[in-house]
Structures are given as structure tokens and as C-alpha cells.
Image: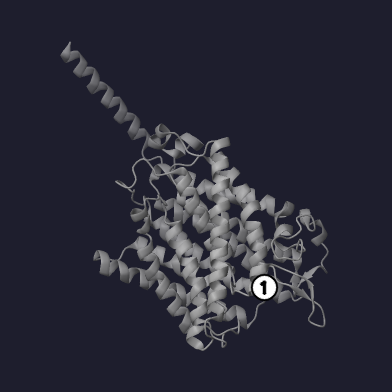
Amino acid sequence: MNSGDTAWVLVSAALVLLMTPGLAFFYGGMVRSRGVLNMLMMSLGAIGVVGVLWVLFGYSAAFGRDLGGIGLLGDPTEFAGLGNLLAPDHLSGTIPTLAFAGFQAMFAILTVALISGAIADRTRFGPWLAFAGLWAVLVYFPVAHWVFDFDETGAGGAVTSPGGWIANRLQAIDFAGGTAVHINSGAAALALALVLGRRRSWPKDPGKPHNLPFVVLGAGLLWFGWFGFNAGSALKADGTAAVVLVNTLVATSAAMLGWLLVERLRDGHATTLGAASGIVAGLVAITPACSSVTPVGAIAVGAITGAVCALAVSLKFRFGYDDSLDVVGVHLVGGLVGTLLVGLFASDAAPAGKNGLFYGGGFDQLWRQAVGAVSVLVYSFVLSLVIALVVRAVLGFRVSEEHETVGIDETQHAETAYHFGEGHSARTRSAVGDVERELEGSRA
């Protein structure tokens, strides 16, 4: 065990957990004031549900011995409860396996929370928790096995324990989750948006963010936590982590500028919401590519993705699906673009050691990236659609029209986010009552 590597992974795990409250602020600021608490609660609910499932059997399903040797699912019973990982000499590389399990738990939590942005203002909380648990078990845990579980080899290089098919058979590059996290959650978001249908006011009144400072705060927390998300995935405090950290910084910066440029050319002004959205788009895009491109390549990946996502968020109006907070336009599209651009901008000077098309590697890595991305997209969309339809049929998924009008915070949680001048409001109500009584008297 290396204490430096262990410390880095533990700190990175904490950073990644911080991303989920950061996402809650990012999403919460983008909705109307009467729905902000429900948005926060959907992210917090994901922490509770997925955190428990991950310990019980989720880690084992993702990283246990492969069932059948075909790379589709780990054995859910091998590490069930994580009790057999408590020994300090149970290592994954140079870190305790339990530290690795905790780090990966944060990925599972965030991925589920990401989906919730597509269904803001119209979703019942209980059915959302049911969907979150079912989706984690049936979709995220298997896909994490495909992408993140690498073959274990013996001293002679022979495979002693096979891992997931995308990581090992296909050999697509996805350093920290462009497919498993972003394409996966984005495809699920599209399926959920289709099942729940449009908000009553959409598209005539798409709604404006009620608190842009919340949005910027959330984007900042996401960017801060993402250094743990990406650089922590090196699982060592080494040169790879350093390259990944710099690439994460510069790609995100370029993506923000790319998004703002599109806004300026298209709309005549650059917005705060656009800057925050560009930040997230850049973080999404560099996630799969951060170990395979140079810093200059990372600038290209970020700038292209920022511009593409700025254009992609308008697709919902063209095709008529109500993706409330642009999970499809940012995470699905951004994840696809970032994953595919690995096949173009990968350089063997970067830690992954592969060349893409623009660096003399031909189309070999590009087709691998495309197969991995499309496979996760199709699997997630189909399973998410089925899960959502089952939850809707059994529990009911959407709030009533009346509750949507009143506000989802009050009807689902019996709370409101803001209480401005309650005493003044009471006086105002008393004054209104006096006026009404006077009018009634004059009419009499």
C-alpha cells in the first residue's frame, strides 16, 4: 500500500461526493422558486438510495468476478456488504480496495442524480426514489462493469480474472466515465422526459432560472469536485493525475468560451447561464478523454463540445421533448462528442498511449469509441424506458396538474424555499380583507 496514493483517492472520493450537492445547487437555481426544494431533494435522495445499494451489492455487481467470462456483469454476491474488504492488506493496486469501493460509490451516486434535471417541476418524489434504485441496479451497475472493471493479470501476463467488455475486449478509452456516467445518464434522461411528458407551461413558457447565483455556485462546486472525479481516477498521485488535472482545467475553460461565442453570435449577448452551462459541457467532454489527449488537444475537445452543446440544447424544441434542464443537450451530447473526439485527438504522448486519426492512428480508435458510446446509449435508453413505464404504471410518476400549478415543493415536501417578510404578508392580507369588507358594505 502506498500512503500517498491512498490519501489522494480518499480526498478525491470526498471531492466527488461534493459534486452531488453542487449539482443540486446547479439544478436548483435553474428551476422556478416553487420547485427548488424538490430539485435539491432528488439529488439528496440519490445519495441515500444509491449509497446503500452500492454497499449491499452494487460494488460487487460492478467489480466482482465476471459472471460467465463475457464481460457483462460482476458477481453481486462476491463482495456483498463489503465486509470481506475490511482487511488492510486487501489492495487494489497500491490502495486499499475499500478506498476504491468508496471512490466508485460517488460515481454511482452522481450518475443517478444527473438524470433528475430532465424531469424538473413535475415528478413525484417517492416514484423518483423507486426509479433511482431500479435504474442503479439494472443499468448503472452493469455498465460500470463494462467500462471500469479491467482484467486482472498474473505474473506472466495471463488474464486471471476477466473484466468488462468495453474496457478489455473493445478497448475503448473512457478514463473517468464519458460513457458510464454521461451518455448513460443522458440517455436515461431522454427516456424519462418522454415517459413523463411536457410540463403544463412548456414550450410556451419554458421558465427562467429563479436564482442564477445558485447556478454559478453549483457549476463552481462541480468544477472543483471534478478534479477529484477525473484526476482521482488515476488512482495514484502521479504524472497521469497531473496530466488529467491540467486537461480538465483547460478543456473546461475552452468549453465555456465556445458556448459563450455561440451565444454571442446567435443571440447577440453572452449569459451567465451560458457560462455555467459551458463549464459543465466541458467537464463532461473531457471526462473520457482526459488521459488520452495533450493539453492543446484538450482545448480542442473543450471548444468543440462547448459550441456543439450550446447548439444542441435547442433540439428539444425542434423534436418536442421537455428536457427541463438540458441533461440531454449537455450530458448525452457532450458525452458522445467527448467520447468520439478521443478517436480524433488522442496522442501517444499522453498517458493512454494511443494515437487518434489526427495523430496518425487511423480510424482504429474512432470505431472503438463509437461502438462503446452507441452500445451504452441504446442499453440505457431501452432499459430506462422500461423502468420508467413500470414505475408509472405501478406507483404513478407525475404530479397532478393542480399540484404542478401550486408548486411541487409545497405539494411533495410541505415546504417552501423562501419566506420573505411573513409579518408584512400577514398585514397585507389583513389590509386586503379590510378593503374587501368595505367594498361589500358599499355594495350593500
Residue 244 lies, in percent from the top left, at: 56, 77
Q: Can residue 8 be seen in this view?
A: no
Furthest toward the left, the residue is 442
Q: Is residue 412 at least partly visible in the picture? A: yes
Which amino acid lies under the numbered mark 1 shown in the image of this protein?
Arg
Location of residue 400 (image quadrant): top left
Vertical side of 427 occupied by 1: above or below? below
Please tell me which residue lies in front, 34 or 170.
170
**Residue 344 at x, y percent in the picture:** 49, 80
| In the rendered image, the vertical position of residue 101 relative to residue 354, given as above or below | above
Tell me: residue 171, above or below residue 296: above
Q: Nearer the viewer, residue 54 or 382?
A: 382
* Residue 38 image position (x, y, % from top left): 48, 44
Give residue 416's quadrant in the image: top left
What secondary structure is marked by label 1? helix
For the residue pair 73 and 211, the one nearer the viewer reads as 73
Q: Which residue is drawn at 75% across and 76% down?
A: 2
Q: Name the residue under label 1.
A: 169
Quick check: 310 left or right of 17? left
Residue 196 location in percent, x, y? 46, 43
**Is residue 244 found left or right of 73 in the rendered image?**
left
Circle 1 residues within 10 Å: few <14, some 14–19, many ≥20 = some
Which image quadrant: the C terminus?
top left
- Count how many numbered circles sit on residues in the image: 1
Asked if residue 300 lies left or right of residue 293, the reply is: left
Residue at the image point whose x is 67% and y is 76% from the top: 236
Which quadrant is home to the N terminus?
Answer: bottom right
Q: Which residue is drawn at 54% across and 43% down?
A: 389
